[in-house]
Amino acid sequence: MSAIADSSSTENPDLSPPGIIPADAGRTSELLRLAFPLIVTFVSHVVMGVADTVIMGQVGTAEQGGVGLGSSLFWSMSSFASGLLSAVTTFVAQAYGASRPGEVRHPVITGIALAIPLGAVLVAASFSVPGLIGLFGTNAEARPHVIVYLRWMLCASPLFLLNFVLIGYFRGISDMVTPMLVTLAVNVVNIVLNVVFVFGYLGAPEMGVQGVALATVISMGLSVVVFFGLYFSRSHHDRYATRDRLPFARIPFARFLKVGVPIGVTWFLENMAFNIMSLYVAAFDPASTAANTIVFQLCHISFMPAVGISIAATTLVGKYIGAGRPELAVRSARRSVALAVAYMGTLGALFLLAPAFFLGLFSSDPEVLRLGAMALHVAALFQVFDAMGVAVDGVFRGAGITLLPMVVRLCVMWMVFVPGIFLLGRYVFETGIMAGWTAALIGLGLQGSLLLAAFFLYPWHLRGRV
């Protein structure tokens, strides 16, 4: 098995995954078959975020805003590492599509080898959290809660990154159902532990914000254990030699970094741009912080399923480029963009028509509801443009093209969006939340339009395997 796995010229054809080109290749039915489990998975993540927000809303407005801001900051601080490691899906999908099962585990080993030191860096960063929060002038009521939550999450970042790598493996081999089932089960555990730890049920101490963080850490650890067990299982080893070692000299670090680093840079700097917005809003008052958190949660309801569609596009485009079928890659890509736009456009319309209904699910504070309604109306307007950018990103990642989206996104985020927050806050709006979300509308509108133009004008489908 070891010789088969490590030599592309002597692979056993019996190990090749069956049915690489299905009967409905490039059709909407194939896209939905892959996207639906991903959408369910991401909706469950949204439900987890909603549960955290609702539970902390029962504790207090400052705690609710603090956990929301802490979660946002954690994602930003870990986004370079997670973006870099998302390249696992691209490499696995292309090896899978090329019927080279012996190469499927190579990017997984690379991802694990990178996740450990990257996680250690994030753990070390936990010691700088109080200074970071103080630097941005977060309001005094929310500040201690942000610090507690963010420190817990950073200390658990190695688990988060390993989870990211293993999920990328399953998605690359077009198995979206296994991650969905594991995630659903783990999220149920997370919600139960949230209630137990936050409010002190079943003999546990009443931990408040620390309880939410501890529940998340335990759930991430459980997820990693389950995914490793599946990855090393007999069936996966028989097909992809997952238990065989790979000599260090053969680990494809250079190729992996070439694709993954631009994604990581994009995710990090783009998330930092949005966190500058959140920190700007948080400097006003607890109601603005809480309203901003709620609007972000509502946008996740729209955004996260579109991310699922985007990942399905990455898998399909990667698979068909690996298989040497660019016409099927194009067909899958166009359907992915159309589906993402239809979904996010529908949610945007609902946000415009019934903002009070959505906001009322999270808070009864009149000031939070007033500020949230203004921001949600603005956020509704950029849903279609955001969908364009998200879907095209997935298509380009599948083709291994990551530098072009990085340039577009970073230019818009840091030359238009971030300056726009402060300019609009100084000269146009009296509230920080309106300045931030209006700048987001301008930035995401421009970004989505540029990426869609690149999708139609750039010959991405003619790229070979990365």
Image (spheres, rainbow, N blue to C red):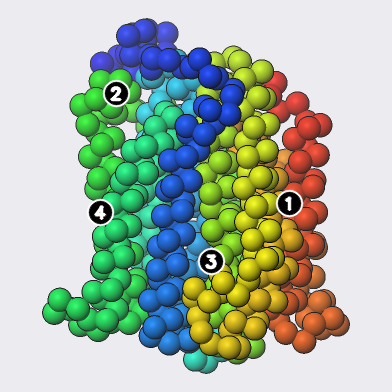
Residue 414 visible? The answer is: no
Quadrant where the N terminus sits is top left
Q: Please tell me whether mark 4 or mark 2 is closer to you in this view.
A: 4
Query: Which residue type carries mark 2?
Result: Ala
Q: Residue at x 43, y 81 (%)?
A: 57
Query: Which residue type carries mark 1?
Result: Phe
Quadrant where the C terminus sits is top right
Q: Which residue is mark 1?
A: 385
Which x, y percent locates residue 323? Answer: 54, 16
Q: Which residue is mark 4?
A: 222
Secondary structure type for disc 4: helix
Left or right: 179 with respect to 380? left
Q: Is residue 315 above or below residue 348?
A: above
Query: Which residue type carries mark 3?
Result: Gln
Secondary structure type for disc 3: helix
* Marks 4 and 2, how far apart at CA: 24 Å
User: Considering only order in the chain, which callout, 2 or 1, is on the residue closer to the N terminus?
Assistant: 2
Which x, y percent locates residue 448? Answer: 75, 49
Q: Which residue is mark 2?
A: 241
Mark 2 surroundings within 10 Å by alpha-carbon count, few (fewer than 14), some (14 through 19), many (20 or more): many
Q: Which residue is mark 3?
A: 297
User: Considering only order in the chain, which callout, 4 or 1, is on the residue closer to the N terminus?
Assistant: 4
Mark 3 vs 2: CB contact within 8 A: no
